Amino acid sequence: MAARASRNYIKDLLYQNAKIGAFGGGGGGLGAVRHSSSVPKIRPKIPQLSKKGRIFTAAFLGIVISGGAYASTVDEATFCGWLFSATKLVNPFFAYLDAETAHHLAVAAAARGWVPREKRPDPSILGMDVWGRRFSNPIGLSAGFDKNAEAVEGLLGMGFGFVEIGSVTPAPQDGNPKPRIFRLREEGAIINRCGFNSEGIVAVAKRLGAQHGKRKLAETSSTAPVSNDEVPHGGKAGPGILGVNLGKNKTSEDAAADYVQGVHTLSQYADYLVINISSPNTPGLRKLQGRKQLKDLVKKVQAARDEMQWGEEGPPPLLVKIAPDLSKLDLEDIAAVALTLRLDGLIITNTTIGRPDPASKNPVSEETGGLSGKPLFNLSTNVLKDMYLLTRGKIPLIGCGGISNGEDAYKKIRAGASLVQLYTAFAYEGPALIPQMKVELAECLERDGFKSIAEAIGADYR
């Protein structure tokens, strides 16, 4: 059965790629082939691909064909592992592309299901209950990758415990001029100054609404009994948890109104909401992290959320994402507001306007924008530790910034994170990083005698 399913999966992939010619690059890109209605039996003409496109297509088809032969001899779990490993062969070809083009291509691939799907269960030691939801593992994808909710199902299917889309702005906006994404490959870092490029809440709401309806239909057709005492697995978008990150429009003079509009339109589809006030690429945004400004903003957004009608699950948790470039006093103010207003969580941290070593030695570091990736790890982890101590472990924290392996994720958890997020390492290493990180994180926990994620949270500062 498993081998037959795997072979059918390979056949589907071959059919899809024969139909479109390639993932993209040259010759018309995705979906460029058109069939002739006048001569229905003539094979469609395959568009001419650029050299990079031909290399990419040949590599992909080679993997698919060899996978087809391999699939007939192994079980589903083994074949699933092979598919993730095989992406290591394709991923380097993205380096030949402009950074933003590669990003769009990766999102398109995930949206169309041209990525491996995790069939193996997560190690039980990685399970975590937060906000009344069961996370099968604590490793999530941060906002910025899937800005417009185009690929939620494909990304969750790759094995992330949760995926955060956005930032989403009320009105569509193009963001800052291109080029605006720059690689620092040797340092494992990226500088971006995208500036909340977004299709807007209406387009995102349509996509999330369709996914939500599909999920509800699957639940209604399921015959499996669910205990009332059992923490529900997955969320509103499928098997994993979905976060929605809200931003403000660049020209907006009323930031609170923008966030409230996002809550009213998108919160019904979110397992948690994020107020992003820490991007360095929107003028004046980080000023909202001040004590008075933050308190006023959170009160208005909480009120907007709570005035809506909610079922038994109640309203989605509300989090705030903060910057790494804050003083001790700033952190104390944010912690005080979070505790006073009973904020549901904090994401620590966004990108930095600084250039921590070794990034500072790279000429690309002179580009303006926020830096993410390995050089951010120590800075963001120190802020995480400080916030864990300031909030006395009473508020769930999501550790984000510079995570590139399971050991990094473990260090974030020991510093106070209940959950962790990555982006830059995923952009460089691709889908194979996800199962690798889960194995490494489970090994770290077992090595130090922890029986669960919950036992390790803040272990270095308790």
Image (cartoon, grey):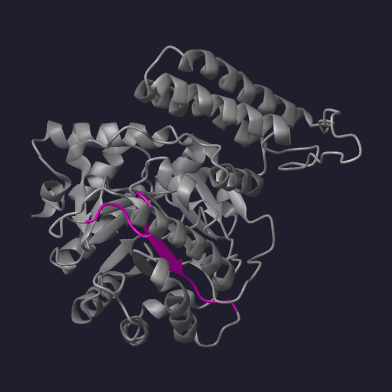
Question: Quarter of the image holding residue 352?
Answer: bottom left
Q: Nearer the viewer, residue 420 or 26?
A: 26
The N terminus lies in quadrant: top left
Expressed as whole percent of the image width and height from the top left, the position of residue 164 reads 42, 58
For residue 213: magenta?
Answer: no
**On the picture, is 210 further left or further right than 56?**
left
> What residue appears at the point 43 percent right and 19 percent down from the top-left corner?
3
**On the picture, is 311 further left or further right than 68?**
left
Could you tell me how many numbered marks the image carries?
0
Which residue lies most toward the right here? Answer: 38
Expressed as whole percent of the image width and height from the top left, the position of residue 133 reads 24, 58
For residue 247: magenta?
Answer: yes
> What residue appears at the point 26 percent right and 46 percent down from the top-left corner?
136
> What residue appears at the point 55 percent right and 55 percent down from the top-left corner?
150
The answer, for residue 337, to whether it is visible in the render is yes
Q: Is residue 139 above or below residue 437?
A: below
**On the picture, is 415 further left or further right than 4?**
left
* Majority secondary structure in the magenta region: loop
Q: Nearer the viewer, residue 344 or 366?
A: 344
The C terminus lies in quadrant: bottom left
Q: Is residue 121 above or below residue 298?
A: above
The answer, for residue 237, to whether it is visible in the render is no
Expressed as whole percent of the image width and height from the top left, the position of residue 219 reads 34, 55
Q: Which residues are magenta?
A: 232-250
Expressed as whole percent of the image width and height from the top left, the position of residue 208 reads 49, 63
